[in-house]
Amino acid sequence: MEIIICANETRVGEIGAAKVAQLAARVGPKVVLGVATGSSPLATYQELAKLVAAGELDLSAASAFALDEYVGLPLTHPESYHATIARTVTVPLGLDPARVHVPDGDPTHLDTAGARYEAAITQAGGVDVQILGVGANGHIGFNEPTSSLRSRTRIKTLAPRTITDNARFFDSAAAVPRHCITQGIGTIMDARAIVLVATGETKAAAMAAIIEGPITSMWPGSALQLHPHATCVIDEAAASGLKLKNYYQQVYANLPDWQRLDV
Ligand code: GLP
C-alpha cells in the first residue's frame, strides 16, 4: 500500500486530486471513476474541479459509479446519494450525467438492484480509479464490520456508529435510513487502482487498523492490504495512530521525483 501523509486536510485534497488525475490521465478520456460520498473526498473533488476548470483534466467522456445509496430515500432528497453525487461530483467535475451511476435504492426493486449494478460496472469495463473514504469503524462504502471480504453489491443494515455519524446530514438520528445498497468489498477490490482519503483524529483508529492491522472483516478497509495498487492519502491527525508513520514518510520522501507528488 502506498501511504502519503500530508500536513493538513487541504493538502489531502490537493494530493488526492493530483493522484486521481495522474491515474485518470494514464487511462485516457474514457476513464471509469469510482466515487464516494461523505465529507472526506469533498476537498479532493473541489481540487479535481479546479483542474477541470483550468483545462488540465477533461472528464467529459468519463463514466462514474458511486459506491452506495440509502434504501427508501426519494432521489430528490438532498441527502440521497443520487443527489449528493450530482451536486458534489457530476456538476463540478463536468461529467455527463448519463454516464454517472448510483445504486438503485428503491425498495420495490431491491431484489435485482445488486446484480443490475454489478452488470453495469462490468459493461463499462470495470472501475479504473476508485476514490474512497472510510468510516470511523473502518467501513468502506457501507460495508460495515463483519461484511464478507468478497461481498458484491447488496443490501446492508447500517451499523449504530454509522447512523450516529450520518445523523448530521439529517434532522435527527431517527431520520437516517436503516438500510442501504452498497458495492461489496469484492466489488471495490476489483477497481484497478484505489485512492483512499481520510482526515482527522476520528479516523486514526480506522487508518491504523487498515494499514497496519491484520486483514479482518472487523475493519473492512483492511482488505485494501490485498490490493496491488492502493494509495492512502491522509493527514497528520488520521495518521496519528500509525506505528510506522516515520517510515512511511521516509519512504515517500525518498521516491524518485517522477513517482512523488509534492506533499
Ligand atoms: C459514509 C459513506 C462512505 C464514507 C463514510 C465516511 O456513510 N457511505 O462512503 O466513506 O461514511 O464518511 P465521512 O467521509 O463523512 O467521514
Image (spheres, grey):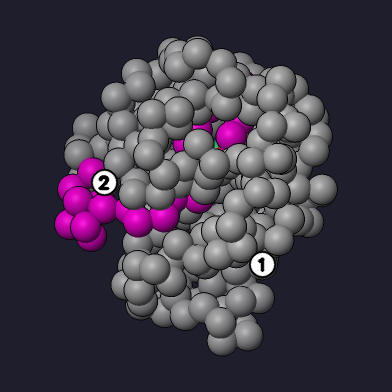
In the displayed orientation, state which residue is furthest to the bottom.
Answer: 55
Image coordinates of residue 181 in percent, x first then y, are 38, 35
Which residue is located at x 50 percent, y 36 percent? 1
Task: Determine whether 192 is above or below 136 in the image.
Answer: below
Q: Is residue 136 magenta?
A: yes
Under mark 1, the amino acid is: Glu
Give the total of numbered labels.
2
Residue occupied by mark 1: 47
Q: Secondary structure at mark 2?
A: helix
> Upstream in the sequence, badge 1 or badge 2?
1
Image coordinates of residue 127 in percent, x first then y, are 33, 53
Label 2, ligand 1: CB separation under 8 Å: no
- First to last magenta residue range: 118-145
The quadrant holding residue 67 is top left
Looking at the image, residue 221 sits to the left or right of residue 227; the answer is: right
- Which residue is at the front of the view, 58 or 246? 246
Badge 2: how crowded within 10 Å, few (<14), some, or many (20+)?
Answer: many
Question: Which label sits on residue 117?
Answer: 2
Under mark 2, the amino acid is: Tyr
Which residue is located at x 66 percent, y 36 percent? 248
Which residue is located at x 52 percent, y 18 percent? 219
Image coordinates of residue 142 in percent, x first then y, are 48, 31
- Which residue is at the front of the view, 254 or 97? 254
